[in-house]
Amino acid sequence: MYQALYRKWRPKSFSDVYGQPHVTKTLQSQLESGRISHAYLFTGSRGTGKTTCAKILSKAVNCLNPVDGNPCNECEICKGIENGSILDVIEIDAASNNGVDNIRDLREEANFTPVNAKYRFYIIDEVHMLSIGAFNALLKTLEEPPSHVIFILATTEIHKLPATILSRCQRFDFKRISPEDITARLVYVAEKENVTLTENAAALIARIADGGMRDALSLLDRCFAMGNYIDEDAVSAAAGIAGTVHLFSFSEFVAKGDFTSALKLVSRLHNESCDIDSLCTELTLHFRNLMVAKTVKDCDGLIVCSKDELEKIKSRANELKLSKILGCIEILEKAAANIKNAVNKKIQLEAAVIKMCSPVSAGSANEELEERIAFLESKINLLASGKTVQTPKETAPAVYTPVAPAEETKAPVKSEPEIQEEKTEPEKTQEKLPEPQTPSASVIDDGPFYNWSDVLEALKKYDIPLFGILAGSSAVIKNGRVIINSENPTLFDFICADTHSRELARAIYDVLGQKMKIAVSNTEKVKTETNPLDNLKNKIGNFNNN
């Protein structure tokens, strides 16, 4: 009968165990010095070698010819323990033998001396599944077992064990096996099985296994059924995942905001029986790699992939902003949680893909806020250095030219960009404003704009946000222009928006009955300690002076 690879290639000595040197070296030293404990506790994630090391330890302790703390695997004791003919090594599954009666039977059997070996071993797997009564029944025997009995407890959930059990055992924590160690082991097994396994395929299996050697060998076993040559495509097909080519296509569609192509790719992979859960996991890992490549300069040791794939990851990371990558990871994490309980998993992933491709994603709000803060900081730095702050002329929108009441059905006419920011002293205007290009119906004398409050009331009907920005402002009329005086530093940037400038021009037309050009006066007034913007500017100025 065919034997699974993870059973066929299970290590038979401590030197064959991959990725757990802190455990194997300690156990070998204890065996060489003869300081063997009566109870061991092996804890760690699945497939990291807990049961394997327990069996090797049982052989090494009872071996007739041990070599440097390792069993010889040649004597009758080692062979008997390996094939199960020696009954002095007993494996118990605590998931199905978790009652008090099972532990009582174990205590009675423990009193009998071993038949063939020197020590009787009890390997209790998934020990956290024992009931509270069973734990209490085991305490006394575990603390003071017969001299010929050794207990080895194995668990993946150490937090479920009572403190009374933990204090009676020597604890060994098994770490997740590194992708490099898994890759090396897979290549070794493939060579022994006369199968060609590419380096990229081995690395992909190691990444999917997530630190578990048993999972990696099980996936390799499935790949063997597809032929004697195994590449990335074979691994992707056997594991039911998208593969790196499709992952890069996804991130490309996200960078371009291509909804259609992304949804078509999801449908195609779904029709090819790609597991939606696995696809979501792979996408999350892919964007995690992009995040690492975006933030870490030397990320070779943090991303498990080939050199060619690493260059592709770095190139794709440069196309995306960090806030966008983080937003995609957040979206995929929420989607993974929703997929588990969803009636239609495909719909949940499609919704996540649409959010990722959308410019208004989880990271867009933060991204926009960061850009606005950076812009304000640059302006503050210029103000602190005494330089004039100017906005590029091409970014200023055209002023809305209102239509006379008799011509309301006509399209609005736009004139050339006319919103300007004026730098004035507290009492006089420094910059001379040019003559208006469009002649007014009647000449309005220069001076204060006494009807400015009426303009604000009219604006209230058209543009509430701009009405709030202009609260507390005043205006004057000079050279055929309405010059707005406001202490709000964001007014100029806000009014540059085409929509806001049109609505303000419309409100002025409602009050004056004629078209007027608009200018903004950036009058600097006496600084107060209660103004946070001025406080920030002072701090920056003091820092530059120091």
Image (cartoon, rainbow, N blue to C red):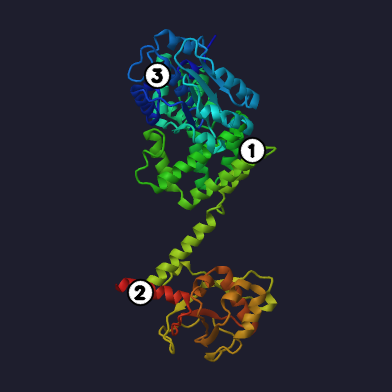
Q: Is residue 118 above or below residue 449?
A: above
Residue 13: which numbered mark, if any? 3
Quote the CA–CA distance across marks 2 and 3.
69 Å
N-terminal of the pair, mark 3 or mark 1, is: 3
Q: Nearer the viewer, mark 2 or mark 3?
A: 3
Label 2 to label 1: alpha-carbon separation:
55 Å
Q: Position of residue 481 (x, y in %)?
A: 52, 83
Q: Which residue is mark 1?
A: 340
Q: Quadrant of the C terminus?
A: bottom left
**Which tag, 2 or 3, sits closer to the chain's start?**
3
Q: Residue at x 63, y 24 (%)?
A: 96
Residue 201 position, x and y percent, is 44, 26
In terms of depth relative to the viewer, which is nearer, 178 or 190? 178
Residue type at numbered disc 1:
Lys
Dividing the picture into quadrants, the one containing residue 538 is: bottom left
> Which image quarter: residue 305?
top left
Element type where label 2 sits in the image: helix
> Which type of secondary structure does the marked residue at label 3 adopt?
loop
In the displayed image of the protein, which residue is found farthest to the left? 546
Residue drawn 46% across and 49% down?
Answer: 320
Task: Name the amino acid type tagged 3.
Answer: Ser
For residue 541, the mark is 2
* x then y, percent, for residue 352: 60, 44
Q: Residues within 10 Å of mark 2 (few under 14, many from 20)?
A: some
Of labels 2 and 1, earlier in sequence is 1
